[in-house]
């Protein structure tokens, strides 16, 4: 009888027994609670199930300093990515080292108990520069660090009580020990992992076939279904794509498993991190491709990382990671041979065909052909279901301008024109109507006006997501809030900002409600244009003026813009 391969033996987890978990839940009910963010939920799952071994909790300040500076924990172990529990200042002020806190999911379920050993305020600029290579908000992890992560970090060991609940693809989700048990049962000793956050196209299939053949190993397709790069295709669509092409692979030597990792898009450091995580999952080899986990362009339009920097850093630490790297160059389709080859092996004079991610999205958006040499018909069909042509997608038209500028009148005219056209439900979210039905308890302070606009943005994003048309007509005086609403909506469809650029003097002349007069007399505080600023949009999709142009003509200008954007069929 052969010995059990080391990579298929059980690894330690942070969960306690069911009996202990039941007792701890009672104890935890009395503790201060922190509701975990989406990223922290991904992190705690991999902490508890051993995916982040050797970590035994959210890292301490000493570990954090070592990881940030030289990719090592305080004990010298290789670990390239800070896994921190960031919290708000308000919560941090209520807890101290030596205390236990309960960590809960958004529904209030207690997942773990953290024993706080460290509390500190990190230098986020240093973290951005050392870990991600630049303090540049064009990097999604740097933007998260500055704009979403709390200002205080808590560190300490955790006791796992129960894993986060997943209602989707349960049969496809494996813990490290479940994967190791599967490899053991199947007699797999060599396993090559393919890390991906994209659908599988023919180039990926060719790359994975070659990797498995070259290493004489079984193939683990191990896509990330936690948090990936903003703008990526959602994981539901991607998993349906993976399942659609699974029968193109030999069933006895291929396995699909989903990894609930929150990616940081950290390029070279992330590649090393992925290697350590895959080692914990029982893998012996890993494909590290060109620009592995790269976030794209920086704010100067240059790549954040050299395309082969990830392979170089992985190779440098390969022995310590404990996973052999299979490095692959970019796979391209050679027209004359009707097959895929690594770009650097293509003979001179041959015709190379390739479709970039940007070009693929354009073809989907415009309903253009996606050739069979590029992808599988089953994958294209799934992508078309999720990304229909623009003329079938939802969108939001967001009018902004001073009170009395004519926003509501143009919005009403546009609504009628779009309803006459038909094909999609149209909803008008006018400022006064929203105030009555959505925001009746709000006043007119800057804070309350922001809340009101964000509520409008949320409703518009839901309408857009469900292939409807939302027309919004608030004043929306602040550029930052408008940018947040744009980001909310552009996850699901097109955001068309229309600045109704009627001058203040004209708005005062039209003042049917007498509001400007009251504001001038000081009877209305913080009135936009008088005692509170209106931040003029710098680059709206369209700017209209209503002094010499009728509302009907303005609405027609908007219709022409929508047609030019491909939104009207």
Image (tube, grey):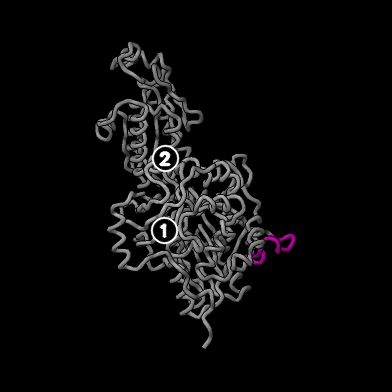
Q: Position of residue 526 (x, y in %)?
A: 36, 20
Q: Is residue 377 magenta?
A: no
- Find the magenta span and give its range: 333-350
- Image point 52% across, 48% down: which residue? 362
Q: Is residue 349 magenta?
A: yes
In this rendering, the answer to whether 561 lies above or below 185 is: above
Q: Earlier in the sequence, mark 1 or mark 2?
A: 2
Q: Position of residue 343 (x, y in %)?
A: 67, 60
Q: Residue furthest top?
A: 521
Counting the numbered discs, the total is 2
Q: Position of residue 360 (x, y in %)?
A: 53, 52
> Mark 2 sits on what residue?
89
**Real-space CA distance between mark 1 and mark 2, rounded to the nearest whole angstrom:** 21 Å
- As helix, strand or loop, the secondary structure at mark 1 comes to strand
- Image point 43% across, 56% down: which residue? 42
The crowd level at tag 1 (other Cα within 10 Å; few <14, some 14-19, many 20+) is many
In this rendering, the answer to whether 405 lies above or below 323 is: above
Picture quadrant of residue 213: bottom right
Q: Position of residue 112 (x, y in %)?
A: 37, 58
- Image point 42% across, 57% down: which residue? 44
- As helix, strand or loop, the secondary structure at mark 2 comes to helix
> Which of these two is toward me, 111 or 541?
111
Q: Is residue 324 left or right of residue 451?
A: right
In this rendering, the answer to whether 562 lies above or below 267 is: above
Q: Which mark is residue 158?
A: 1
- Image point 36% across, 14% down: which residue? 508
Q: Is residue 163 visible?
A: yes
In this rendering, the answer to whether 220 lies above or below 43 is: below
> Which of these two is toward me, 412 or 286?
286
Q: Is residue 304 left or right of residue 124?
A: right
């Amino acid at each position: 009888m052969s010995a059990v391969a080391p990579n298929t033996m059980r690894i330690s987890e942070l969960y306690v027994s069911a009996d202990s978990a039941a007792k701890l839940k009672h104890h935890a009910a009395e503790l201060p609670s922190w509701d975990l963010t989406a990223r922290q939920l991904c992190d705690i799952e991999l902490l508890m199930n051993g995916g982040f071994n050797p970590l035994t909790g959210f890292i301490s300040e000493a570990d954090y300093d070592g990881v940030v500076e030289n990719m090592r924990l305080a004990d010298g172990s290789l670990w390239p990515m800070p896994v921190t529990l960031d919290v708000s200042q308000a919560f941090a002020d209520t807890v101290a080292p030596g205390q236990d806190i309960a960590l809960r999911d958004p529904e209030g379920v207690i997942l773990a108990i953290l024993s706080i050993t460290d509390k500190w305020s990190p230098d986020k600029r240093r973290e951005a520069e050392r870990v991600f290579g630049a303090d540049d908000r064009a990097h999604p992890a740097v933007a998260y660090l500055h704009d979403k992560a709390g200002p205080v970090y808590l560190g300490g060991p955790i006791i796992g009580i129960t894993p986060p609940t997943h209602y989707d693809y349960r049969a496809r989700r494996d813990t490290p020990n479940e994967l190791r048990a599967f490899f053991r049962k199947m007699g797999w000793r060599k396993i090559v992992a393919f890390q991906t956050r994209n659908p599988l196209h023919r180039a990926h299939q060719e790359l994975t076939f070659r990797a498995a053949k070259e290493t004489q190993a079984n193939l683990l397709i191990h896509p990330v279904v936690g948090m990936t790069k903003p703008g990526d295709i959602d994981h539901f669509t991607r998993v349906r794509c993976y399942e659609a092409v699974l029968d193109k692979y030999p069933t006895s030597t291929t396995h699909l498993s989903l990894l609930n990792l929150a990616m940081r898009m950290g390029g070279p450091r992330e590649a090393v991190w992925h290697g350590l995580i895959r080692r914990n999952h029982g893998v012996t080899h890993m494909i590290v491709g060109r620009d592995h986990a790269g976030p794209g362009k920086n704010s100067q339009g240059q790549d954040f990382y050299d395309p082969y920097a990830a392979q170089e850093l992985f190779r440098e630490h390969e022995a310590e990671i404990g996973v052999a790297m299979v490095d692959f160059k970019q796979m391209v389709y050679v027209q004359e041979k009707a097959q895929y080859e690594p770009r650097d092996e293509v003979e001179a004079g041959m015709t190379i065909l390739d479709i970039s991610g940007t070009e693929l999205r354009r073809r989907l958006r415009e309903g253009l052909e996606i050739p069979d040499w590029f992808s599988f018909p089953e994958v294209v069909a799934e992508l078309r279901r999720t990304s229909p042509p623009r003329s079938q997608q939802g969108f939001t038209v967001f009018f902004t301008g001073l009170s009395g500028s004519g926003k509501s009148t143009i919005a009403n005219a546009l609504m009628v024109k779009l309803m006459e056209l038909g094909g999609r439900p149209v909803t008008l979210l006018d400022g006064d109507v929203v105030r009555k039905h959505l925001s009746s308890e709000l006043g007119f302070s800057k804070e309350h006006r922001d809340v009101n606009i964000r509520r409008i943005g949320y409703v518009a994003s839901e309408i857009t997501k469900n292939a409807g048309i939302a027309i919004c007509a608030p004043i929306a005086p602040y550029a930052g809030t408008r940018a947040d609403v744009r980001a909310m909506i552009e996850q699901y469809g097109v955001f068309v900002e229309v600045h109704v650029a009627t001058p203040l003097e004209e708005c005062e002349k039209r003042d049917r409600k007498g509001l400007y007069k009251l504001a001038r007399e000081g009877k209305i505080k913080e009135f936009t244009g008088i005692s509170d600023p209106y931040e003029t949009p710098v680059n709206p999709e369209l700017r209209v003026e209503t002094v010499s142009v009728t509302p009907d003509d303005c609405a027609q200008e908007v219709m022409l813009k929508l047609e030019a954007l491909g939104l009207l069929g």
